[in-house]
Image (spheres, rainbow, N blue to C red):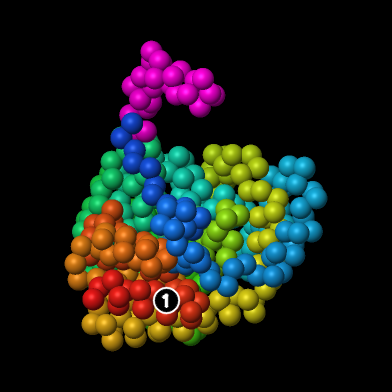
Amino acid sequence: MDVQNNRNKSLTNMTCDFTELAVSGVRGLMPYQPGKPLAELEREYGVRNADKLASNENPLGPSPMAVEAMSKALTSTWLYPDGGGFALKQRLATYLGVPAGQITLGNGSSDILDFVVRTFVSADSEVVFSQHSFAVYPILTQMAGARAVVPAAKDWGNDLQAMRAAITDKTRVVFIANPNNPTGTWLPARELEAFIRDVPENVIVVVDEAYYEYASAPPMMAVDYPNTIQWLDRYPNLVVSRTFSKVYGLAGLRIGYGVSHPQVADLLNRVRPPFNVNSLALEAAVAALDDTEHLQRSIDINCQGMQQLTQGFKSQGLDYIPSVANFVAVDVGREAAPVYDALLYEGVIVRPVANYQMPHHLRITIGSEAQNARVLTALQKVLS
Ligand SMILES: *Cc1c(COP(=O)(O)O)cnc(C)c1O
């Protein structure tokens, strides 16, 4: 008998039901569904040169300066990374204009969201986030065994009035993605600040700015997009999270950060596992911050691609949700799951969002000009 069969046999022979042993939050957990990897699509569907426009990655890839920094650091990977991330925190402190003591480094910004929940949320707490918001919020809430309170969205975005009304004395954390994923909608400064001012100070408000760089800079520039870092002095319960996964093209490295009141940062750093950020990521992130040209190129190609895609949708008579991020949710006017599947056969991976209660939409990441053209052609073909 081969090894594989042996293993299967011992798996079925267990006498203990581990699901029963798992803590209740984990028992009810639905794992996050990542986008289909390219290699898997090519194998399963027999297509070649497929394009993945499903996970909001930068079509230009990382800055060459970041790649060079990583190459140089490769031979030092036998050493543990700097557990305090000193150099990167200093660089971020300068870039953001805050003391390094207000920064927490994460293995992706998802790590920061996790630390906030671990620090402030217990089984009898409530966590508030909007309908159609990022899938990681319900997962973290469920993991903590807490109750998710999910007000209905307004115009596909956060309904701040409904969110305020949903806050009770059990609420510990509110999550707001700005811009929001998967809808691409954003909240202007005046509205968002009025909300934060109105929230009791003992409720942590996390503003998740994974797409900050796209929304805040020309030529995209969301109208009245807030600079939340400047609000930290006024609102000690505010936590801002950002990432190197999106515009900086370093999703595979896993690095992001949180900025908060120093006392909150101190708490987040207590739950942060030692060495949570690897040494290559620490080096690459510093170099990525230095390469402002690559950053601007990435923002520019995104803005052009957004116009290309939305013009294409218009000419095909498809509705879409206006977005200030590096993706756009398009309404395919019917059940989107079969459309997603048909697109796979055309060699294009996009993101179905039925699990976000958007069964007629597909979320499409802005790619290169050629990739955008390909997805538009494929869409036209499968919808005809
Ligand atoms: C992509 C994304 C993140 C960040 O993911 P990390 O790779 O863990 O930094 C966080 N929030 C939202 C809304 C996102 O879309």
* Residue at screen point 28% across, 86% down: 315
The answer to whether 257 is drawn above or below residue 249 in the figure is: above
The answer to whether 316 is drawn above or below residue 60 in the figure is: below
Q: Nearer the viewer, residue 118 or 71?
A: 71
Q: Nearer the viewer, residue 329 or 120?
A: 329
Please state if 48 lies on the left or on the right of 97 as rendered.
left
Question: Which quadrant would the C terminus be assigned to in this image?
Answer: bottom left
Please state if 265 lies on the left or on the right of 343 as rendered.
right
Q: Residues within 10 Å of mark 1 (few under 14, many from 20)?
A: some
Magenta span: chief secondary structure:
helix
At which x and y percent is residue 1? Answer: 51, 20
At which x and y percent is residue 192? Answer: 35, 68
* Residue at screen point 38% across, 42% down: 31
Q: Residue furthest top?
A: 15
The answer to whether 58 is drawn above or below residue 261 in the figure is: below
Q: Nearer the viewer, residue 136 or 375?
A: 375
According to the image, label 1 marks what residue? Answer: 374
Q: Is residue 350 magenta?
A: no
Q: What span is in magenta?
A: 1-26
Task: Choose top left, top right, bottom left or bottom right for residue 253.
Answer: bottom right
Q: Is residue 4 magenta?
A: yes
Task: Choose top left, top right, bottom left or bottom right for residue 26.
Answer: top left
The answer to whether 343 is drawn above or below residue 148 in the figure is: below
Task: Choose top left, top right, bottom left or bottom right for residue 158.
Answer: bottom left
Q: Judge: label 1 CB < 8 Å from ligand 1.
A: no
* Residue at screen point 44% across, 19% down: 9
Q: Amino acid at mark 1?
A: Arg
Residue 321 seen anywhere in this rendered image of the structure? no
* Residue at screen point 41% across, 57% down: 45
